[in-house]
Image (tube, grey):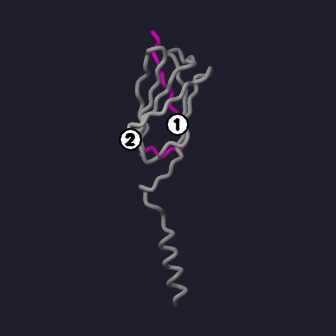
């Protein structure tokens, strides 16, 4: 009897974790492009944690790609790019988007 009770308690404690207990591990990546879809090397991508307002930056390479690994899945983020004084639209990545990898192209009008 005690053995059955112990097994029942361990099964309950091993139940699915609380939804608020989300782990860090989202990858945000993409490209910075001009209006003709050409990469914009040396553009700077900014990612803002909307809860803490902490900003991370990434300087893109020759192919225009950026990547921000290990972002929290429990936080909303805003992302935009700047290139030679011009700025892309700001895009949002929601905590309710359950994808582990989020691809976002950022277009900068260089005119």
Disc marking residue 52: 2
- Depicted 47 relative to depicted 89: above or below: below
Circle 2 SS class: loop
Residue 3 included in the magenta stretch of the image: no
101 lies above or below 61: below
Q: Residue at x 47, y 46 (%)?
A: 73
Q: Residue lying farthest bottom? A: 1
Which residue does the numbered mark 1 point to in the structure image? 28
Identify the main secondary structure in magenta: loop
Image depth: mark 2 or mark 1 in front: 2
> Residue at position x 54%, y 80% from top?
7
Whether the residues at callouts 2 and 1 have beta carbons within 8 Å, the answer is no
Between the residue at mark 2 and the residue at mark 1, the CA separation in whole angstroms equals: 18 Å
Horizontal and vertical percent position of residue 9: 49, 78
Please tell me whether mark 1 sits on a helix, a strand or a loop. strand
Quarter of the image for residue 52 reads: top left
Above or below, 36 relative to 46 = above
Q: How far across and down, in percent of the image, does residue 35 sit?
A: 49, 15
The magenta segment:
96-111
Q: Nearer the viewer, residue 88 or 103?
A: 88
Q: Residue furthest top?
A: 111
Number of numbered callouts drawn? 2
Instruction: Look at 56% across and 29% down and name the residue there.
Output: 66
Q: Quick check: is 103 in the magenta stretch?
A: yes
Mark closest to the chain's N terminus, 2 or 1:
1
Q: Which x, y percent locates residue 76?
A: 41, 41
> Looking at the picture, how far across and down is residue 75, in whole percent?
42, 44
Residue at image position (47%, 53%) is: 22
């Amino acid at each position: 009897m005690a053995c059955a009770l112990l097994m029942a308690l361990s099964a309950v404690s091993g139940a699915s974790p609380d939804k608020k207990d989300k782990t860090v591990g989202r990858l945000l990546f993409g490209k910075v492009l001009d209006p003709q879809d050409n990469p914009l090397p040396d553009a700077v991508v900014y990612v803002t944690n909307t809860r803490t307002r902490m900003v991370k930056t990434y300087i893109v390479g020759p192919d225009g790609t950026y990547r921000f690994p290990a972002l929290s899945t429990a936080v909303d983020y805003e992302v935009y790019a700047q290139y030679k004084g011009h700025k892309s639209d700001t895009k949002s990545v929601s905590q309710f988007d359950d994808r582990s990898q989020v691809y976002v192209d950022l277009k900068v009008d260089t005119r």
